[in-house]
Image (cartoon, coloured by chain):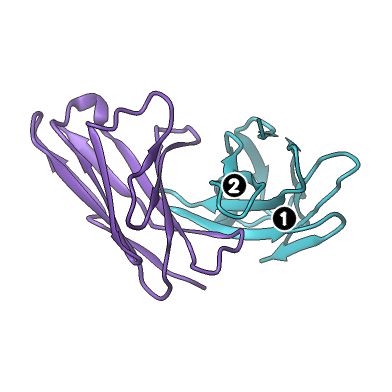
Chain colours: A cyan, B purple
């Protein structure tokens, strides 16, 4: 079945550091790919998405590019802030009405 | 973006009682809603898929008689935890897919259940 693998955390960075969170996937079809963010005590918020190969999703300084050849969707940000501290989930959706398949999540802590 | 609400946001109940959690899509119609459970510092575990007007589809290992799901309208799904026990304490999150059936799921803010 479909699956998502993302780097295990926790990841601790200093403010203004460069962030990469790796995500790779396996899927039988051509999935849409997502990054969700969960702030402490809250539900999930969609951060960005890409629906086809070579698409780049971006939001709030975060970016991720759908790489079909490497089955990857790595999340990057050039300069993290303390407010970016959260858990980040990579996810995919293969068919229109199937639930999202989530990675295990990566906890990011940014220190001033 | 689309909004999904959950109520209550936090609930504490005694062992043996039942608790109902509501999930509402506020500005769109959701033919399909999903219920997830999240353990501390863990990922989301899909519990069931709820389709409006039909029985929910439960994931393997999820007791359907314990976690009752009702999706009576296009904007409301409820999860009732029956005869709750301390091990049912968790963070429950719902999500909804809009009537147009695009790939995006909109998540509720979650409900923290504590069973004492």
Q: Quadrant for residue B80, please give it.
A: top left
Chain for mark 1?
A: A
Please give the name of the residue rendered at 48% of the width and 32% of the height, measured from the top-left corner. B42
10 Å neighbourhood of mark 1: few (<14), some, or many (≥20)? some
Chain for mark 2?
A: A
Q: Nearer the viewer, residue A5 or A3?
A: A3
A60 over B18 or under it: above or below = below
> In the rendering, which numbered label is found on residue A111?
2
Please give the name of the residue rendered at 88% of the width and 39% of the height, measured from the top-left corner. A70
Q: Describe residue A89's horizontal placement relative to residue B11 as left or right.
A: right
Q: Secondary structure at mark 2?
A: strand
Please give the name of the residue rendered at 53% of the width and 46% of the height, measured from the top-left corner. A99
Q: Earlier in the sequence, mark 1 or mark 2?
A: 1
Q: CA distance from mark 1 to mark 2?
A: 10 Å
Q: Quadrant for residue A79, please give it.
A: bottom right
Q: Quadrant for residue B46, please give it.
A: top left
Residue B112, position in %: x, y? 28, 44
10 Å neighbourhood of mark 2: few (<14), some, or many (≥20)? some
Residue A27, position in %: x, y? 73, 37
Residue on which the image places disc 1: A16
Q: Nearer the viewer, residue A99 or A81?
A: A99
């Amino acid at each position: 079945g479909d699956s998502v693998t993302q780097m295990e955390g926790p990841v601790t960075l200093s403010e203004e550091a460069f962030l990469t969170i790796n995500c790779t996937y396996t899927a039988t079809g051509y999935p849409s790919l997502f990054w969700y963010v969960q702030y402490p005590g809250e539900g999930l918020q969609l951060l960005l998405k890409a629906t086809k190969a070579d698409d780049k999703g971006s939001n709030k300084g975060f970016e991720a590019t759908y790489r079909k050849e490497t089955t990857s969707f790595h999340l990057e940000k050039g300069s993290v802030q303390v407010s970016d501290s959260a858990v980040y989930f990579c996810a995919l959706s293969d068919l229109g009405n199937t639930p999202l398949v989530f990675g295990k999540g990566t906890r990011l802590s940014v220190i001033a | 973006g689309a909004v999904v609400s959950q109520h209550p946001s936090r609930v504490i109940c005694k062992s043996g009682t039942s608790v109902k959690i509501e999930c509402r899509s506020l500005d769109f119609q959701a033919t399909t809603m999903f219920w997830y459970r999240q353990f501390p510092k863990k990922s989301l575990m899909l519990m069931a898929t709820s389709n409006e007007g039909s029985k929910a589809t439960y994931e393997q290992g999820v007791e359907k008689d314990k976690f009752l799901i009702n999706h009576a309208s296009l904007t409301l799904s409820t999860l009732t935890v029956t005869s709750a026990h301390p091990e049912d304490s968790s963070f429950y999150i719902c999500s909804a897919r809009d009537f147009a059936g695009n790939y995006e799921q909109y998540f509720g803010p979650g409900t923290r259940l504590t069973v004492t």
